[in-house]
Amino acid sequence: NAGVTQTPKFQVLKTGQSMTLQCAQDMNHNSMYWYRQDPGMGLRLIYYSASEGTTDKGEVPNGYNVSRLNKREFSLRLESAAPSQTSVYFCASSTPGTGNTIYFGEGSWLTVV
Amino acid sequence: EDQVTQSPEALRLQEGESSSLNCSYTVSGLRGLFWYRQDPGKGPEFLFTLYSAGEEKEKERLKATLTKKESFLHITAPKPEDSATYLCAVQENSGGSNYKLTFGKGTLLTVNP
């Protein structure tokens, strides 16, 4: 049971480069999320998708875009990477059938130099 | 003002020495309070959900409790393998299908043999 799968696991970007973080879940969950985790800041919500076809901004959306490709997949795009976007990114998913519990992927480590 | 505050930031225990972690929260309406465990280099792993004041849940050496303003994670006779960062998060009752979590900054627990 894979759960929530993120790719890539590690990535180094130069300032100004673009990239997309991919996320897929195999639990048939309705909602998906992107969080970032920084030392001393905790986990902060970037964007979420309550259901297929909808996306909404979270706490720290600037510099990011998202696409809910289908029910399984939710991607996060950095159009022009900045050093401030160096972080660990977590994708997650949830559904009412599990008591709204949010399940996380293993994380993607992104360094922008 | 932080919605979720965890204390202490770090806690070092000897094996077998019981203690508690605190999570205080300020939300207008609580849908659920979640506890997660996070190991280094991994995504958060779900432990418990508490929905109403007075509720308690247990799993092995861990017991979570909830009041109207805070939650405690009690660790009884901890073992070194309980060492991890413990995260608390709240889900607000904002209506609709918005199940996003707001996290505290976590408590880093170290259990020495």
Image: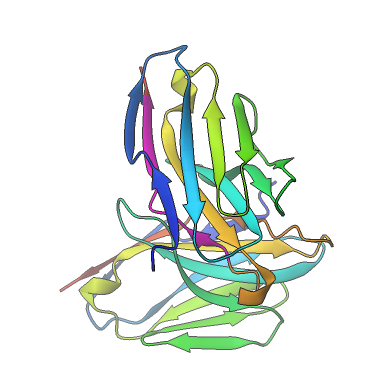
Give percent across and percent down for residue B31.
Answer: 74, 70
- Residue A47 vs residue B110: left or right? right
Above or below, A87 relative to B79: above
Look at the image and give the residue range highlighted in magenta.
A102-111
On the image, which quarter does residue B102 sit in?
bottom right
Q: Residue furthest top?
A: A16
User: Residue A53, how many percent across, how many down?
Assistant: 73, 46
Q: Is residue A107 magenta?
A: yes
Numbered-mark total: 0
Residue nearer the viewer, A69 or B87: A69
Residue A40 appears in the picture as rendered: no
Please identify the quarter of the rendering in which residue B109 is found: bottom left
Residue B28 locus on image (x, y percent): 82, 62
The residue positioned 61% from the left and 53% from the top of the image is A32
Q: Residue at x 65, y 57 (%)?
A: A31
Q: Is residue A47 left or right of residue A111?
A: right
